[in-house]
Image (cartoon, helix red, strand yellow):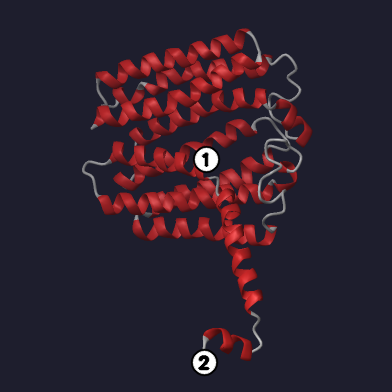
Amino acid sequence: MEAGSLLKARGIPLGGISRRAHSVLGTLPSYLELTKPRITALVVVTAAAGYLLGAASFDFALFAHAMIGVALVASGTSAMNQVLERDVDALMVRTRSRPLPAGRVGTPSAAVVSGCLAAAGIIWLWVAVNPITAGLALATFISYDLVYTPLKRVHSLSTVVGAVPGALPILGGWTAATGQLSPGGWALFGILFLWQLPHFLALAWLLRDDYEAAGLRMLSVGDFEGRQTRHQALLYALTLIPVSLVPSVLGLTGAVYFGVALALGALFLLAAIRFARSASSANARGLFRASILYLPLLMAVLVLDKL
């Protein structure tokens, strides 16, 4: 008997199976969108940089296991963030078309998927890499979703708090290679931590109306002239310059990185000074773009000079 006839004989309609299969396949892009692939890719790249800078010799299998685990945790963390902020996302122009507020994915299933991804990544890192890296991944998930995400609703300090989970992946890459928390890894953490603050402050100024409409207590909300936002962005950009030179002081890199880091830091600072002088959208956008250029260039030179 043919497969179609057999299914009909058992009372299973072919059309129903086809529709269900089509429905499942149709929601896959929405589940992928939940994981914020571009942010996940950035997290993996920074973790890879941490691994390459910490490794005495390259172990491809260990590197692959570390990157898989980091990618799983980053995906689950981003997805859980969207679960927790689905009501806020629905109020903002920038995020109202995301899968949950748009109704393309159900909240229970999204929560299950996000939790499974994060748990799988943490277990993977524990078994295939080391407990320290797994612990850092768990700390990333907790600090981002259970501390930073709810804090955004009550205090502007959330931006500083949120920079912690954003900087932990490069430290996780370092511990994956070295098996320990050491000064070199913390120096990399410091660079990523400080870089994020001018980056997000510039973005928060550009999106301040959206954040206010959603009831999020970002520093830019209520800072009508942008004085606090501008001055803090300048302070962090200035502090980033000496911190970015620490890898050379520790002997991780040589003179090439030192010179490039100094030049990139000066250009980044120049964009922050322009924003500090005038809180125009053009200056905020200039600082945001400078931050996007700064990080990949710095990471590339950091790794190449070390290698």
Residue 76 visible, this angle:
yes
Farthest-out residue, top: 277
Of badges 2 and 1, the one in the foreground is: 2
Farthest-out residue, left: 57
- Residue at (65%, 75%) from the top-left corner? 15
Disc 2: which residue: 1
Q: Image height check: is 281 above or below 122?
A: above
- Residue at (28%, 54%) from the top-left corner? 61
Of residue 240 and residue 299, the one placed in the foreground of this image is 299
Give how far across and how far down residue 49 sits, in percent.
35, 37
The kind of secondary structure element at disc 2 is: loop
Left or right of 84, for residue 33: left
Give how far across and how far down residue 40 sits, in percent.
49, 44
Residue 254, labelled with which disc?
Answer: none
Give how far across and how far down residue 192 sits, in percent.
46, 31
Amino acid carrying mark 1 in the image: Pro
Amino acid carrying mark 2 in the image: Met
Residue 231 visible, this angle:
no
- Residue at (73%, 19%) from the top-left corner? 223
Left or right of 235, for residue 302: left
Of residue 179 and residue 16, the one placed in the foreground of this image is 16
Q: Could you classify mark 1 by the number of other residues whose Cα lies within 10 Å: few (under 14), some (14-19), or many (20 or more)?
A: many
First along the sequence among labels 2 and 1: 2
Of residue 282 and residue 20, the one placed in the foreground of this image is 20
- Residue at (24%, 49%) from the top-left corner? 59
- The residues tagged by marks 2 and 1 sit, at their Cα atoms, a distance apart of 58 Å
Displayed quadrant of residue 288: top right
Name the image quarter holding the C terminus: top left
Disc 1: which residue: 165
